[in-house]
Image (spheres, rainbow, N blue to C red):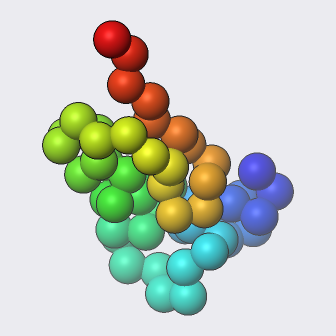
Amino acid sequence: MDKLKANDGYCPCMLQKPPETKCMCQQFKDMIEAGESGACHCGRYILTQSE
């Protein structure tokens, strides 16, 4: 959480700071929309599917 705050809310694992890397990143939002399971790039959020 401290690294996220120190990076102005952008994913601390990304080198660039476009709006798509602002936490919750676009990659993870796309996973939610597609109904996929997995984790965001840095592992802060994990999406699981329930039956």
Q: Position of residue 46 (x, y in %)?
A: 53, 40
Q: How many marks?
A: 0
Q: Going 62% across and 74% down the picture, which residue do you hit? A: 13
| Spot occupied by residue 6 in the image (x, y as percentages of width and height) | 75, 67
Residue at image x 76%, y 51%? Answer: 1
Who's the residue at 81% across and 57% down the image? 2
Q: Residue furthest bottom?
A: 15
Quadrant that contains the C terminus = top left
Would residue 8 be found to the left or right of residue 40 on screen? right
Identify whether 17 is placed above or below 22.
below
Q: Quick one: 37 or 21, which is closer to the camera? A: 37
Residue 5's quadrant in the figure? bottom right
How far across and down, in percent of the image, does residue 3 sit?
77, 64
Q: Residue furthest right?
A: 2
Q: Is residue 28 left or right of residue 23?
A: left
Check the image and report above or below for 40 versus 48.
below
For this rendering, which residue is in front, 30 or 22? Answer: 30
Q: Seen in the image, is 44 located left or right of residue 26?
A: right
Q: Residue furthest front?
A: 51
Which residue sits at x=63%, y=48%? 44
